[in-house]
Amino acid sequence: MSCVVGEDLTMKDVIDVMQLQREKSKQAISVDYREVENNFVAVRFIFECGIKLDAQPLTIATAAILYHRFFKEADSSGYDSYLIAATTLYLAGKVKDDPLKIRDVINVTHNTLNRGAAPLELGDEYWNMRDAIVQAELLIMRMLKFEVTIVHPHKFMLHYLKSLEGWCEKDDWSKMPIAKAASAFLQDFHYDPAILDYTPQHVAIACINLALQCYGGQVLPTDEGEGVPWYSVYADDLQKDKLWEIMEKIMEVYNKEPK
Amino acid sequence: MLPGSNRINEVYSSGTMNTKEKEKYIEEFDFPFCDEASKYEKVAKIGQGTFGEVFKARDKSSHKKFVAMKKVLMDNEKEGFPITALREIRILQLLKHENVVNLIEICRTKATQFNKYRSTFYLVFDFCEHDLAGLLSNVNVKFSLGEIKKVMQQLLNGLYYIHSNKILHRDMKAANVLITKNGILKLADFGLARAFSVNKNGQANRYTNRVVTLWYRPPELLLGDRNYGPPVDLWGAGCIMAEMWTRSPIMQGNTEQQQLTLISQLCGSITPEVWPGVENLELYNKMDLPKGQKRKVKERLKPYVKDPYACDLLDKLLVLNPSKRYDSDSALNHDFFWTDPMPCDLSKMLAQHTQSMFEYLAPPRRPGHMRVHHHHQGGAGAAGPTTRPSSSMDSGYQDRVF
């Protein structure tokens, strides 16, 4: 099989999400988290704090998934979403053996919520927050039946991309930043609780397929494999409808971004 | 609202409940996915260690069903749920195998004013009637050769399974090998277990070497290796296998130095000739390693272990060089398991014993560990009862995390 850049595709077939993203990123968005409180913004908070804490990407992804899983079980009006977000980060550090110091988590989350504020003194406010995180951690684990191990799409995506790379002409592959775009889609899909609705394998395939669509890349089947899509070797249980449904969900994320 | 959230909300906004209301709210909070520990009724304490307490308990909803409850030690509550306990839970949730202890659920106690609104957590396991240390310390329990084979086969099967799931047990010892009254063996206590990875990009792992109870600790750990793997568990398997005949741990050192001396006296001197690369281990030059010792594994075990295949397998497990030590797969393919008498069921033998046997409940085992010039089994033990070193003598024993 070979992979060709789709010169025969017209631009209207190309969903240029990357272009959209590029335009948006020109203006650096600094969210005032105290102004808005919803799940999207809370996950943004997780990513912002996670990066500041120098947490591993999979630790941050774990925190986002734990956050969504918690609010799948609990009523969001009853809980402070930033407390839950801070706690999922702290817990994710333990789960991924990438421990984050609780004091760092408190300082970073506090400063991200109150931009420009001085570091917290070791006083009542600090100890209350620390206690809050410790208690919220126990709450989250009880709500999740202590099942906090997460199977990430990342490892599947890496494996799929690796074998696709070998499958394609070297020149064609290097022309398109498929791996980069797919990774970006995967990370961004973590903003949406819909990520819980699909298997990690399917999510990985959807991210790659969306990247291929964006750049007009196509994995052509061989003569023997006429009509068989590229991803069927990785997941024979993924129908086209389902795949497009996931891709649409991924694209929807970009409409939810605060303006 | 949860207890903590309430407080943090006070920071950001203002709380809505007064203290009394909050306490009541906390006491009555229902966790649909985490049952209360009171669904079980404690019957007896069956274990105690630095890891915490273990109880036998009865399931109140079905009177015949028993479980083992292991209390989660919340020693450092300021850091929240201990990362070591979380690791143990995640490992137990991953491992589902006939020869690995089965985690049923995690329970909690109600938070009340009596525990300062802090719940206690318990890991709840299927109950196993005996542990191997308890059985071996009872002179009335006699294992036939076929039965010993069955024990070892199940033990190695369990190790094969956990290692293929990329988990190291790191605390192999007779007391952590449970046996049900039906003769099914279960590896237990994953409190020191961790996931391992094969070295990538030539980058060595840096695991703590402060693991495994001293008497079962392999030479590479005693020499400060931090890039170890499954062979650490196979050394323990060898020690346990020998113990099936000697009835007490074969090398009972009091210090790491003494343990290395005992190992050298049994397995021969630790040198780069028998173990290339050993000279690079951190403590190789810091420890006093006896020179000129001949390997005497078969010779010294023969008085206890009459079966030549058993002696040969022991000789393949108690190998100094971890890369030459048998793995569980090779051990399972050894003739020991495939010659008469074949491994045979333990349930008949165990049916003669109606009392549970746990090391914790048993009187101290005879100290008669194998001495160099010690010819008959159970001979006059000179020293008083030895205290068994626990697997975690201090907090530094486990992976330091914070």
Image (tube, helix red, strand yellow):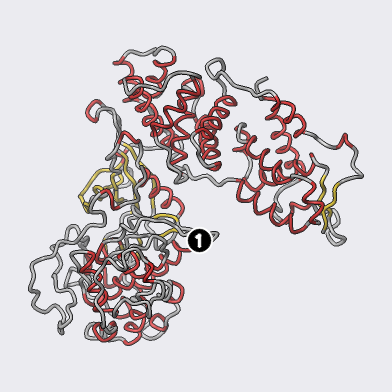
Height in image: B131 above or below A185? Answer: below
Height in image: B263 above or below B190? Answer: below
Q: Is B391 situated left or right of A86 in this image?
A: left
Image point (75%, 34%), residue name: A18
Residue B387 position, x and y percent, is 15, 61
Image point (26%, 57%), residue name: B391
Whether residue A106 is visible to the viewer of this picture, yes or no, is: yes
Q: Is B76 situated left or right of B8 in this image?
A: left
Question: What residue is pinned by disc 1?
Answer: B199
Q: Is B219 situated left or right of B352 in this image?
A: right
Quadrant location of the C terminus of chain A in the rendered image:
top right
- Give the image quarter of residue B222: bottom left
Quadrant location of the N terminus of chain A in the rendered image:
bottom right
Residue B138 position, x and y percent, is 17, 69
| Element carrying mark 1 | loop
- Give the image quarter of residue A87: top left
Q: Which of A196 and A42 is in front in this view?
A: A42
Q: Which of A192 and B27 is in front in this view?
A: A192
Q: Nearer the viewer, residue B14 or A79?
A: B14
Height in image: A99 above or below B371? Answer: above
Whether residue B55 is visible to the viewer of this picture, yes or no, is: no
Query: At label 1, which amino acid type do we have?
Result: Asn
Mark 1 burial class by Cα count in 10 Å: few <14, some 14-19, many 20+: few
Q: Which of A18 and B183 is in front in this view?
A: A18
